[in-house]
Image: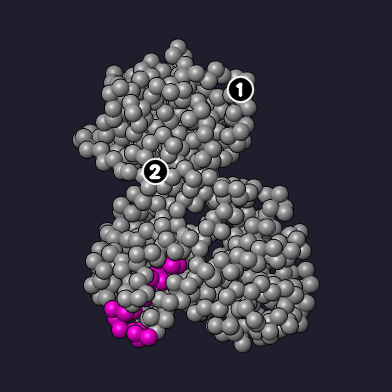
Amino acid sequence: MCGIVGYIGPREAYPIIIEGLKRLEYRGYDSAGIALFDGKDLKVCKTKGKVVDLEARSDKEITKHGSVGIGHTRWATHGVPNDVNSHPHISNSGDLVIIHNGIIENYESLKKELISRGYTFKSDTDTEVLINLIEDVKKQENVKLGKAVQIALNQVIGAYAIAVFDKNKPEEVVIARLGSPLAVGIGEDEFFIASDASPFLEYTKDAIYLEDEEMAIIRFHKGIKIRKIKDDSLVDPYIQKLKINLEQIEKSGYDHFMLKEIHEQPKAITDTYRGRLLRQEAIIKMAGVEDNMKKFLNADRIIIVACGTSWHAGLVAEYIFEDLARVPVEVEYASEFRYRNPVITEKDVLIAISQSGETADTLAAIKLAKSKGAFVFGVCNVVGSSIARETHAGAYTHAGPEIGVASTKAFTTQITVLTLMALRLARAKGTISSSDFRHHLLELEMIPKKVEEALKSDAHIQKISEIYKDVNNFLYLGRGYNFPVALEGALKLKEISYIHAEGYPAAEMKHGPIALIDENMPIVVIATKKGHYEKVVSNIQEIKSRKGKIIGIVTEGDVQVKELADHVIEVPETLESLSPLLTTIPLQLLSYHIAVMLGKNVDQPRNLAKSVTVE
């Protein structure tokens, strides 16, 4: 959840850390802080609020000199967002300082033990307990900081990514991870530390990603040593070349990252199927699927696990796999799956979906499935992420960096990958004819241009948004492939505008939700020509007879719904199985414009973080 940034080298650390925190503010933004060593003493500044609030406070409270420092932007877990609970946290002696992403589950028992030894605590956080535990180990065992961190972490239960340094030995920083991502940028006699690579892209393209249960001691002029936390064994560092660039993580003239990412979807979808969809040859090439085709062909069922928007993409995939490849599919919330004692066998294939590749619940579900002998396939966006490493095989979405907390292009690129997988499996099983297969490839190849057409409704959607921006509730209805899109549309509105919204299968409306409908209730109905159209029209008539306000998402040229609805938004025609890639576009824009009109922070909605790396 939280964002971690650190620097050690010849440059001034402050500007690097502050700019890095701004790039990581999507990970956590209820408070921020920084610690610098100015050559003589430790300078710490932290505050509730945004990174800009930290900048303003730093101008007044600290000198900004120093070539080693760490910074943090917080998403609160233990302790309310305030100045005291903000990171960094300092040990009782004032010598050690830490930043931390994650949760220490046994912090209360550790805290009681430390209190019995005379330690005091200013904050409500688990992190302050951890830094004092490290200090206590360092004193009791008479060891250096690196060893003290290792011993302390072996007493800890939970998840963490940490960076620690000692003001008495400011030429080194100690970092470690378990369950939360941590990257090290390797420069010319300098090192950058961050939750992801975005803070140091302008300085270096060489990066090391720590694996779970690894720690590193980074020494100025001496380099980096990586060890296993459990047994102290040395690890050979693997340096990756980063492929993303600074331009990809900037707004490029858009008012918000979310709007930029909505408009990036034609390119993101193209990038996702490029090299995989070979229409002229009527071939789909996906190494992760091809190399494990027997696992897919022999599977009794496919289990899809995910959270949030990725779960909605999984629901769409359920329709696609069952329809095209004729294989049973179950879609599970990863957070529930891991605690339900599910029945998993060696004949199951589990597909784990996550934009970040770091979602804690999804990672736990992967480990559970692997322990039961299932074959696990990952679908994620971030190269080198934990899910990419934990799964047996997988496919990247190639959506590019997604900074906006409310996922948009992640959803459409995940559906694109899952569609390619289902088509390839259907072809191998013989459950789709050659002509239908070719038709699907042609239609999928045309989707980016059709998304561009759908985006042209932006101005029209703005006008509709102005009409409904002050309502308290929305209802979203869809059938078949577009039921998950209704769920996703409702989620987007909730996430960024804070308006209550619910998604339902259209046919379920009369089993309860119809009681909510009156002249003040806007209902978004996905009513494309392909897929139960006449049934949806009947549902619209039921709404109309109860004076509900209807916003119809329809196929270009539609007449019937146009006569019934208060507003219609047109999308191009395509196959029913591909329609979610188009019908989701106006719902993204509707939620975006309503949130902007209400003055909400679209890219950083309250209480949310981009990557949920804690339970």
The color scheme shown is: one colour
Q: Helix, strand, or loop for circle 2?
A: loop
Residue at left 69%, top 58%?
A: 594
Name the one closer to the observer, 432 or 27.
432
Q: Which x, y percent locates residue 91?
A: 45, 23
Label ID, residue 318: none
* Amino acid type, label 2: Pro
Q: Residue sitting at 24 percent across and 66 percent down?
A: 291
Instruction: Name the mark nearer the viewer: 2 or 1.
Output: 1
Quadrant in which residue 354 is drawn: bottom left
Q: Is residue 423 magenta?
A: yes
Q: Residue at x 50, y 25 (%)?
A: 14
Amino acid bearing label 1: Asp
Marks counted in the figure total 2
What segment carries the magenta color? 415-435
Give the prevailing secondary structure in the magenta stretch.
Answer: helix
Which one is nearer the viewer's eye here, 116 or 204? 204
Say above or below: 41 vs 172: above
**Foreground pick, 260 / 173:** 260
Residue 137 magenta-drawn?
no
Q: Is residue 570 visible?
A: yes
Q: CA distance from mark 2 to mark 1?
A: 31 Å
Q: Is residue 565 shown left or right of residue 383?
A: right
Q: Residue 165: x percent and y percent? A: 39, 24
Q: Residue furthest front?
A: 280
Q: Is residue 441 above or below residue 408?
A: below
Provide residue 138's location: percent of width, then percent of height.
33, 22
Give the residue displayed 68% in from the left and 58% down from the top.
593
- For residue 59, the mark is 1
Query: Disc 2 or 1, which lies upstream in sequence?
Result: 1
Q: Which residue is mark 2?
A: 181
